[in-house]
């Protein structure tokens, strides 16, 4: 197994949250000698409270998946060395799409949105419940998740006081176009292609991307013979980057990077 020699990491956050989700992780890897860049998505450079105040912002509504992939590809191209790509949720899907474009020295997809063609019975039931949000609302406006939705889907299992302050600090409006694109042709992965080492991480309590769905994503790659690993951690919901166990997960990722 070859070592990943790069000391640069590009972090990509997910939907409905701001880039501050990566703050602890960014500091952790910088403390271990890495150069880390964790840029916000286009049109999301302001703090979460300001983005919510501006809602509806038509620039956010206009954002598409291909814009996001190109945006992070451009950022990676001007870094001093080829970075490790680390993405959460839709950022995990973008990570896989970037690796497919030969962007990145390795990839870590944390609770990733799966590419088209990856599904389980549980995910089909979840889709039946949540897909109307994507397909029956106008994409002309972004969608701002309500606090009860945040409680049910992102921070399930946490104390209400934690759910409230995390919503106030991190929750932002999102482009419905990006959510739709995630199940369309522009999100397709050719799993037979050679790829750099890839780690897919899942959590037992995640209601957005259940562990079984991430495992199905992993199995698609497993058949091609290139380095792909899967890890399911107990107690993790979709807010995994900010749970009290975040440092344990970051340490696992650090060791994985050092291994390959």
Image (tube, rainbow, N blue to C red):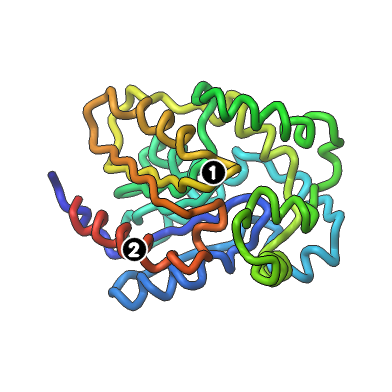
Number of residues whose C-alpha sits closer than 10 Å to that of mark 2, classed few (under 14), some (14–19) or many (20 or more): many
Question: Is residue 32 visible in this depiction of the protein?
Answer: yes
Question: Is residue 47 visible in this depiction of the protein?
Answer: no
Earlier-in-chain disc, 2 versus 1: 2
Compared to residue 218, the image places residue 230 above or below, namely below
Viewer-proximal residue among 62 and 197: 197
The quadrant in which residue 13 appears is bottom right
Percent position of residue 129, x then y: 73, 31
Number of residues whose C-alpha sits closer than 10 Å to that of mark 1, classed few (under 14), some (14–19) or many (20 or more): many
Percent position of residue 93, x then y: 50, 40
**Disc 1: which residue:** 69
Tell me the distance, in whole angstroms, between the alpha carbons under discs 2 and 1. 18 Å
Percent position of residue 50, x then y: 78, 70
Q: Secondary structure at mark 2?
A: strand
Q: Residue at (59%, 43%) from the top-left corner?
A: 207
Q: Residue at (82%, 38%) from the top-left corner?
A: 139
Q: Secondary structure at mark 1?
A: helix
The quarter in which the N terminus is drawn is top left
Q: Which disc number belongs to residue 124?
A: none
**Disc 2: which residue:** 8
Q: Residue at (22%, 27%) from the top-left corner?
A: 225
For this orientation, the residue located farthest to the left is 1
């Amino acid at each position: 197994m070859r070592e990943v020699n790069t000391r640069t990491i590009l972090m990509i956050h997910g939907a409905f949250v701001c880039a501050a989700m990566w703050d602890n992780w960014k500091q952790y890897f910088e403390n271990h000698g890495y150069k880390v860049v964790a840029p916000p998505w286009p049109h999301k450079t302001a703090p979460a409270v300001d983005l919510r105040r501006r809602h509806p912002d038509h620039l956010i509504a206009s954002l598409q998946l291909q814009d996001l992939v190109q945006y992070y590809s451009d950022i990676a191209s001007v870094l001093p060395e080829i970075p490790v790509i680390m993405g959460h949720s839709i950022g995990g899907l973008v990570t896989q799409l970037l690796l497919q474009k030969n962007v990145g020295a390795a990839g870590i997809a944390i609770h990733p949105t799966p590419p088209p063609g990856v599904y389980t019975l549980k995910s089909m039931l979840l889709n039946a419940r949540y897909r109307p949000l994507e397909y029956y609302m106008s994409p002309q406006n972004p969608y701002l998740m309500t606090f009860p939705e945040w409680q049910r889907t992102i921070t399930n299992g946490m104390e209400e006081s934690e759910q409230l302050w995390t919503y106030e600090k991190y929750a932002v409006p999102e482009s419905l176009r990006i959510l739709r694109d995630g199940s369309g042709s522009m999100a397709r992965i050719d799993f037979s292609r050679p790829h750099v080492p890839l780690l897919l991480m899942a959590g037992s309590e995640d209601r957005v991307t259940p562990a079984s769905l991430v495992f199905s994503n992993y199995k698609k790659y497993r058949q091609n013979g290139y380095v792909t690993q899967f890890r399911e951690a107990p107690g993790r919901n979709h807010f995994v980057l900010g749970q009290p166990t975040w440092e344990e997960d970051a340490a696992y990722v650090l060791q994985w990077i050092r291994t390959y």
